[in-house]
């Protein structure tokens, strides 16, 4: 074959698509929630076939400084897109803006970041999910009594939205059901357990409890067991783990609001890939569902799929 024919043959060969370099920065590494989300991310990657993923987050969701440092490390020209679940909506705003200013497409997932530098935000409708928890607890308590709210850390947009949705629902719909405590427990299971124990010591007669995420629900269940109050207080948690499912089946937890982090991860990766290719996904805000899981419905197939990674 002549040199000319060889050159023509190579020019006609289809060029292979370049792998996109996508970085995912979760809030933490110590919760099952992120295992679910990564499964959704990887499903979207498989469908595209040309994505290289870096997954790196802080150990705990109260380590805001580490998350900012990770974001800065990966804000570099060879990165096409960053997906981040923000630990603090205000403090992450400027690092996210700087990444976007470099031409990196930023997708925010799960928990909001202030500003508008991101191309998409994929999240549970957390305010409505908080109201769902309030509706369940109000029914269990016959719409009267006292309740306590255990939050995680200040500045966490998703969990604060849940707490606010919960409190607003009670104020509007159940005036005889009063929130007597609204406190932050901390960003790890251990801190949340200590915060929960302190809350129970301060308010031993409280009738109902709402914990806003996996770590606070875990911590509250441990504190209730240690104090002999498990099953005696009406308790609604948020998110799922094997430990929390055990509490549900033992009737120590009376409802778990469970999100769909697989779907969040899937949609986030789809949005990141589209943005990196110059075709942003619309609308900018994408909401995913949450359901109330109880001892009565947790074995239904459509619910069970949300409960185990």
Image (cartoon, rainbow, N blue to C red):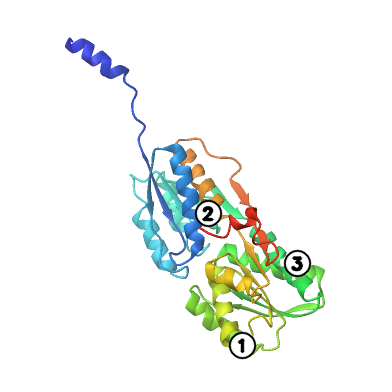
Check if mark 3's residue and mark 2's residue have beta carbons within 8 Å: no
Check if mark 3's residue and mark 1's residue have beta carbons within 8 Å: no
Residue 275 at least partly seen: yes
Q: Which residue is mark 3?
A: 135
Check if mark 1's residue and mark 2's residue have beta carbons within 8 Å: no
Which comes before the other along the chain, label 1 or label 2? 2
- Residues under labels 3 and 2: Cα distance? 26 Å
Give the SS element for disc 2: strand
Q: In the orientation shown, which residue stands out farthest toward the left?
A: 2
Residue at 59% over, 66% down:
159
Q: Give the answer, above or below, for where 158 lies relative to 101.
A: below
Res 28 → quadrant: bottom left
- Residues under labels 1 and 2: Cα distance? 38 Å
Disc sitting over residue 133 in the figure:
none
Q: Between label 3 and label 1, give the one nearer the viewer.
A: 1
Residue at 68% over, 66% down:
294
Q: Between label 1 and label 2, give the one nearer the viewer.
A: 1
Sort mark 3 into few (<14), some (14-19) or many (20+) by Cα contacts within 10 Å.
some
In percent of width and height, residue 124 lies at 61, 56
Q: Which residue is mark 1?
A: 228
Q: Give the answer, above or below, for where 39 lies relative to 132.
A: above
Q: Give the answer, above or below, for where 5 lies relative to 238.
A: above
Q: Front-most of 222 and 131?
A: 222
Residue at 50% over, 72% down:
187
Q: Front-most of 139 and 272?
A: 139
In percent of width and height, residue 51 lies at 39, 42
Disc sitting over residue 109 in the figure:
2
Q: Please identify the quadrant where the N terminus is shown.
A: top left
């Amino acid at each position: 074959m002549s040199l000319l024919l060889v050159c023509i043959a190579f020019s006609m060969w289809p060029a292979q698509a370049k792998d996109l370099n996508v970085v995912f920065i979760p809030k933490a590494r110590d919760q099952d929630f992120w295992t679910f989300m990564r499964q959704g991310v990887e499903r979207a990657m498989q469908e595209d076939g040309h994505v290289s993923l870096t997954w790196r987050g802080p150990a705990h969701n109260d380590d805001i400084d580490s998350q900012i440092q990770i974001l800065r490390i990966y804000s570099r020209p060879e990165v096409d897109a960053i997906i981040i679940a923000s630990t603090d909506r205000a403090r992450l705003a400027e690092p996210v803006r700087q990444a976007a200013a470099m031409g990196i497409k930023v997708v925010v997932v799960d928990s909001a970041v202030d500003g508008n530098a991101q191309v998409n935000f994929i999240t549970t409708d957390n305010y409505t999910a908080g109201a769902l928890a309030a509706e369940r607890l109000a029914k269990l308590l016959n719409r009267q009594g006292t309740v306590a709210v255990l939050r995680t850390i200040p500045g966490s947009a998703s969990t604060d939205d849940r707490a606010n949705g919960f409190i607003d629902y009670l104020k509007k719909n159940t005036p005889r059901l009063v929130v007597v405590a609204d406190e932050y427990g901390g960003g790890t299971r251990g801190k949340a357990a200590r915060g929960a124990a302190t809350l129970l010591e301060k308010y031993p007669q409280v009738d109902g409890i709402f914990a806003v995420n996996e770590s606070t629900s875990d911590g509250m269940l441990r504190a209730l067991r240690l104090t002999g109050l498990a099953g005696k207080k009406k308790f609604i948690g948020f998110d799922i783990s094997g430990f929390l499912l055990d509490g549900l089946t033992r009737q120590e937890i009376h409802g778990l609001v469970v999100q769909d982090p697989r779907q969040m991860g899937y949609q986030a990766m789809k949005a990141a890939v589209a943005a990196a290719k110059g075709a942003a996904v619309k609308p900018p805000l994408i909401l995913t569902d949450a359901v109330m899981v109880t001892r009565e419905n947790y074995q239904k197939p459509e619910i069970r799929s949300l409960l185990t990674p």
